[in-house]
Amino acid sequence: MYLTQGLHRMAQQQPHALATVFRDRRQSYAQMTDRVARLAGALQKLGMQAGDRVGLLGLNSDRFLEYFLATWWGGGVVNPVNIRWSVAEIVYSLDDCDTRILFIDDTFLPLAPAISASARVTPLLIHVGDGPAPAGMLSFEQLIRDNAPVDDAFRGGEDLASILYTGGTTGQPKGVMQSHMNLWSAAVARVADVPVPADAMTLHIAPMFHLAALSRVILISLIGLPSVFVPAFDASDVMRTIERERISDILIVPTMLQALIMHPDFARHDLSSLRSLTYGASPIAVPLLELALKALPNVEFTQGYGMTEAAPPISANGPQNHSAEGIANGRLRSAGRPGLGVTVRIVDEHDNEVACGTVGEVIVRGPNIMLGYWNKPEETAQALRGGWMHTGDGAYMDEDGYLYIVDRFKDMIVSGGENIYSAEVESAIASHPAVAVCAVIGIPCQQWGEAVHAVVVLKPGNQAADAEIMEHCRRLIAGYKTPKSVEFREALPLSGAGKILKRDLREPFWQGKDRSVS
């Protein structure tokens, strides 16, 4: 149960099989294994010891996969950096888990000076690109050329494999620790539940700092099939790649699907090779699904529900419910049923299981559940109390085991597939000198599922415009976390204990909806 096992098997059994495709670069499993072993040797020479963290700030590519595998081959732990973060957020994630080696590609080179200047320990920077490395950086390709391959460290099982940062309920991101067992078991269970055809060609579209994308690339490399990459989502580029490489399998979020089928050139591309489309991060709107089913009549649709802490699969809603029958019987609205190896319960506030049809909190256990949060023992204990991962999602389960998500107990907003914790945004707003108190909620958004909405109470005698609040936030947090709308009030609704009643704030926006979150 180690994440480099697929490389060993393919190098031994099918060394000349296609491993990766990125633009005009194509390489076999034998070639990739050699590059990974050499890069692992380079990392060890640079000081990476067993369990040390190594980061990458960059767009998707074949080199991103090599970074994952080489870090594990050399005994390290990956810390892929959220490319949508501000410099302050990036530096926090590097400092928090003491990441001292950082790969950075051409797109993000302009951020390098600020990262180096503000990090607690200046990271050693490795340029991921085709041209010469900038001054003060090492070259990814040169390191591979100059170093001999080393033996695999064979870390696996409960050894730490990755730290992926997710939003924090206290205003700071949390580093989710996943072991080799967590990631390996999630991939193997998925393959057992939904077998991948031997001739599958998978296109990786979602950003690889997300665990959904990382888990898919792990799955494909473990079973030894080709991985095709595009740097980032661009509808035209995705359609051209599907057509050129005869892609059969993709994972996207609903907003990407909408952009594809609504693109003016959609009908001009031959997408007939597509057989499987998995989407996640948010439910799909019925009108969009109906359009997609007509546009892609030979494609099987599956919704995945999960979270970073679960590596990420919790349940899946398969092709049988993405149909006219699924729309009619309501199963389309479900998050599906738990997969192999995953046990799910719906419980009340005392963790007692509730009856079918009763709303409670989704709790999960299985070999895919995280080790905990990096350096956050109290939050780890709270999340994993009783041996179950407490998701913070409110749901009910029907008599056939289908989950229906109806609310989010934790103050999290999901916008365009990104998790946004309200505490992070509230912390940024509260630092504005005119703000007395604020609350951040998610409101319906046709394009992104949910949009960030701020409700602000100003200090007596102070004034501020909504644009001013937004710009203030934009300087402190990532753009996708910045409020898209700001509402000013004289006071916020409070409970008897003085807690802000966010459900009351959300209720007017979600009237007429069958759920209070997207």
Image: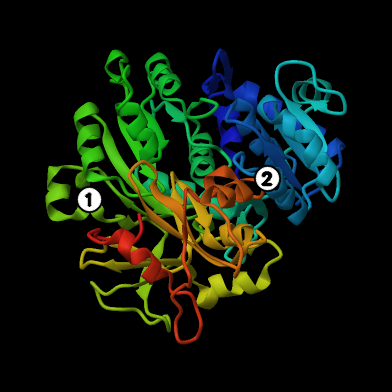
Residue at image location 51% in from the left, 82% down from the top: 498
| Image side of residue 157 versus residue 268, left or right | right
Report the front residue among 380 and 49: 380
Expressed as whole percent of the image width and height from the top left, the position of residue 126 reads: 78, 31
Question: Which SS class for mark 2?
Answer: strand
Q: How is the image coloured?
A: rainbow
Expressed as whole percent of the image width and height from the top left, the position of residue 273 reads: 31, 21
| Image side of residue 357 versus residue 156, left or right | left
Q: In this rendering, is residue 221 above or below 35?
A: below
Whether residue 262 can be seen here: yes
Q: Are marks 2 and 1 in contact (CB under 8 Å)?
A: no
Residue type, mark 1 in image: Leu
- Local packing at callout 1 (Cα closer than 10 Å; few below 14, some 14-19, many 20+) is many
Whether residue 197 can be seen here: no
Task: Name the quadrant containing residue 84.
Answer: top right
Task: Name the quadrant containing residue 46.
Answer: top right
| Image side of residue 29 versus residue 358, left or right | right
Question: Which SS class for mark 1?
Answer: helix
Mark 2 vs mark 1: which is more N-terminal?
A: 2
Q: In the rendered image, which residue does mark 2 sit on? A: 78
Q: Give the position of the C terminus as an image quadrant.
A: bottom left
Q: In this rendering, is residue 35 above or below 191?
A: above
Expressed as whole percent of the image width and height from the top left, the position of residue 387 reads: 52, 73
Expressed as whole percent of the image width and height from the top left, the position of residue 281 reads: 41, 48
What number is the disc on residue 477?
Answer: none
Residue type, mark 2 in image: Val
Report the front residue among 61 and 498: 498
Q: In the rendered image, which residue does mark 1 sit on? A: 332
Residue at image location 82% in from the left, 40% down from the top: 116
Q: Residue furthest front?
A: 461
